[in-house]
Image (cartoon, grey):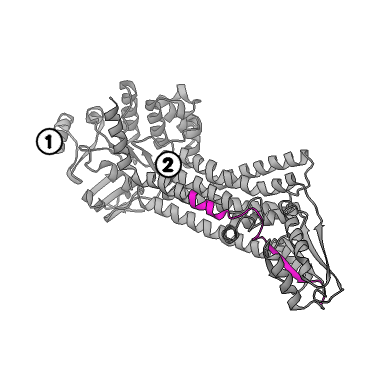
């Protein structure tokens, strides 16, 4: 009795080998490979600016301090403290190591000061590793070296930090799970809509619906934050704009996958896999490079990472959106490309006909 | 808009297929089909499974593109009933009707006529996903007519329907056809539509095997059998 049913499963496997290969071979392999991007638990590859405290600091002194810091950070040289601070605000670096003059002068008192952003909560404690290491190794210099750490305002709590970060990821979850499900449920009416109206008109109507639902979700989460007393400015127009831009781009990507796969189960798996990839590789919680240099590079390619940085900067730290002009431009470009991707997928869907 | 002129008479709109061929990965679904759907007819499209009926309807509806040949359609709306009901599953019957009625210019009274004529009054407030297959078929058919289009194309409209519902659909389609309104029915149920049909087209192996006006109702079934077997 079991044999015929087992044979049926073999038929099914033969008929669906592509989807099975993706879900049960490729996905687990990628999952295994992904573990290689977690290299260490010391934030060794987190970018930290090394900048002179004043004009008297020499290049040799900067290089020496950068060399000491390299074991617990990825030092990047900046010409001035201001430039380094700007990079810190933009989350290009996560700390600014200010180097005083006189490291090689016996008897001189030199201060190495690491400033970290109080809003980047998940780096405040780990940055102690940097100062601790510098303190341990400062004996190589003939001068008397004092290592200090300063936490720049505004200081925020971990819940506030996670709240601001979670806004983007909340939209990502909707974009790759609920939205494709919603359209797949109405898949069978698409032929009628194509005859009576058009899929483009349908997508415009859906954009209106999902914009309203997304706004409701953000408003609901925002109210929860207000009730908890969080100091996060979700209502800032720039924050809402970035959320709309990012949410729209992610929805366009997921729907493009859905249309190209004709709303199949394989398409749903692909969208869930994309969501997993985004969550895993966009550095939602820790600074870039916290676990490995590879992850720092990958995050740079993720628009969700850039959106998170902007939302954190504006909503959590109260920075001007202009601070993140380059990232905003990138997000606009990604949104445009995503819409083109969706448009191409819809055209392909229509060209394949009903039975294609 | 493609219109035919005949002397001083008013132009009569039609749907025209000229040398239409459709191939799928080397399989010929339709081959050199010439066909006219003229105003006022209840036009039956019959043929065995795989003869190309659904493909032809998809092409006329613009859901697919011919590999060769041309299809000329008048401007304006074409109503359609699908082999698999094409409805919003999470809306009620009335909500479905309202959505698609709003895409045309038919009034509320016509919507009520369609709903009553197809026997949907009793389930008008029910969510479609919770209805039986037969009712979902009827909702799909109602959506084909609710915009009061000039051309209505129905693909196997009697599937899943009980006898009473079949009679209602045939009667409604026959009443609807006439004047400038045309109904094309792709069906296996020739016996049900037989008496009401004005024109019969038989497809076999993707080609038009027979395409004539049907004058003698008694010959209808035999014509179908002759060309479809």
Q: Is residue A218 left or right of residue A109?
A: left
Q: Residue at x 64, y 56 (%)?
A: A290
Residue A1 screen position, x and y as percent: 28, 24
Q: Is residue A175 magenta?
A: no
10 Å neighbourhood of mark 1: few (<14), some, or many (≥20)?
Answer: few
Q: Residue at x 54, y 47 (%)?
A: A276
Q: Nearer the viewer, residue A164 or B153?
A: A164
Q: Is residue A35 magenta?
A: yes
Q: Note whether residue A9 is visible.
A: yes
Residue A342 screen position, x and y as percent: 48, 54
Q: Residue at x 75, y 49 (%)?
A: A233
The Cα–Cα distance between marks 1 and 2, rounded to whole angstroms, is 44 Å
Q: Which mark is residue A300?
A: none
Q: Nearer the viewer, residue B197 or B140?
A: B140
Q: Nearer the viewer, residue B33 or A82?
A: A82
Chain ID of residue with mark 2: A
Residue A11 screen position, x and y as percent: 29, 38
Say which of marks 1 and 2 sits in front.
2
Q: Quadrant of residue B157?
A: top left
Read off the magenta span.
Answer: A31-55
- In the rendered image of this protein, does residue A332 appear above or below residue B138? below
**Residue tagged 1:** B226
Q: Note whether residue A201 is visible.
A: no
Q: Which mark is residue A265?
A: 2
Q: Residue at x 18, y 35 (%)?
A: B215
């Amino acid at each position: 009795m079991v044999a015929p049913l087992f044979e049926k499963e073999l038929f099914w496997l033969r008929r669906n080998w592509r989807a099975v290969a993706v879900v049960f071979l490729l996905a687990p392999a990628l999952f295994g490979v992904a573990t290689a991007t977690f290299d260490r638990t010391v934030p060794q590859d987190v970018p930290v600016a090394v900048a002179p405290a004043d004009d008297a600091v020499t290049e040799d002194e900067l290089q020496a301090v950068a060399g000491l810091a390299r074991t617990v950070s990825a030092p990047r040289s900046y010409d001035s403290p201001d430039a380094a601070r700007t990079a810190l605000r933009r989350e290009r670096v996560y700390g600014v190591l200010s180097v005083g003059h006189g490291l090689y002068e016996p008897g001189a008192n030199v201060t190495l000061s690491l400033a970290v952003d109080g809003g980047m909560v998940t780096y405040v404690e780990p940055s102690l590793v940097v100062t601790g290491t510098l303190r341990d190794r400062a004996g190589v210099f003939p001068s008397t070296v004092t290592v200090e750490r300063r936490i720049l305002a505004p200081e925020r709590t971990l819940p506030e930090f996670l709240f601001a970060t979670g806004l983007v990821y909340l939209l990502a979850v909707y974009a790759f799970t609920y939205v494709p499900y919603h359209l797949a449920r109405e898949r069978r009416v698409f032929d009628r809509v194509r005859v009576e109206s058009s899929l483009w008109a349908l997508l415009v109507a859906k954009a209106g619906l999902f914009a309203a639902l997304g706004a409701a979700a953000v408003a609901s989460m925002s109210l929860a934050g207000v009730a908890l007393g969080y100091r996060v400015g979700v209502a800032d127009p720039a924050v809402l704009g970035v959320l709309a831009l990012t949410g729209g781009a992610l929805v366009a990507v997921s729907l493009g996958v859905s249309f190209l796969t004709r709303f199949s189960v394989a398409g749903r798996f692909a969208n869930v896999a994309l969501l997993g990839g985004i969550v895993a590789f966009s550095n939602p919680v820790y600074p870039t490079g916290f676990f490995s240099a590879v992850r720092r590079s990958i995050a740079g390619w993720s628009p969700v990472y850039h959106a998170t940085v902007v939302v954190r900067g504006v909503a959590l730290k109260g920075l001007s959106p202009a601070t993140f002009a380059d990232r905003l431009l990138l997000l606009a470009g990604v949104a445009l490309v995503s819409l083109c991707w969706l448009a191409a997928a819809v055209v392909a869907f229509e060209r394949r006909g009903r039975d294609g | 808009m493609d219109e035919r002129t005949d002397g001083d008479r008013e132009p009569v709109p039609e749907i025209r297929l000229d040398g239409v061929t459709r191939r799928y990965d080397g399989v010929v679904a339709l081959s050199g089909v010439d066909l006219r759907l003229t105003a006022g007819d209840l036009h039956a499209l019959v043929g065995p499974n795989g003869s190309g009926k659904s493909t032809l309807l998809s092409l006329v509806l613009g859901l697919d593109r011919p590999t060769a040949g041309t299809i000329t359609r008048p401007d304006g709306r074409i109503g359609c009933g699908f082999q698999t009901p094409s409805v919003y599953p999470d809306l009620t019957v009335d909500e479905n009707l309202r959505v698609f009625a709003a895409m045309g210019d038919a009034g509320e009274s016509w919507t009520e006529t369609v709903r009553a004529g197809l026997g949907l009054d009793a389930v008008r407030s029910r969510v479609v996903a919770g209805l039986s297959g037969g009712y979902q078929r009827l909702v799909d058919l109602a959506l084909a007519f609710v915009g009061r289009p000039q051309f209505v194309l129905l693909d196997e409209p009697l599937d899943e329907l009980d006898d009473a519902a079949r009679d209602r659909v045939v009667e409604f389609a026959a009443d609807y056809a006439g004047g400038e309104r045309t109904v094309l029915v792709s069906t296996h149920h020739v016996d049900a539509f037989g008496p009401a049909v004005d024109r019969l087209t038989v497809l076999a192996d993707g080609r038009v095997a027979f395409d004539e006006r049907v004058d003698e109702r008694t010959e209808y079934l035999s014509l179908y059998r002759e060309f479809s077997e």
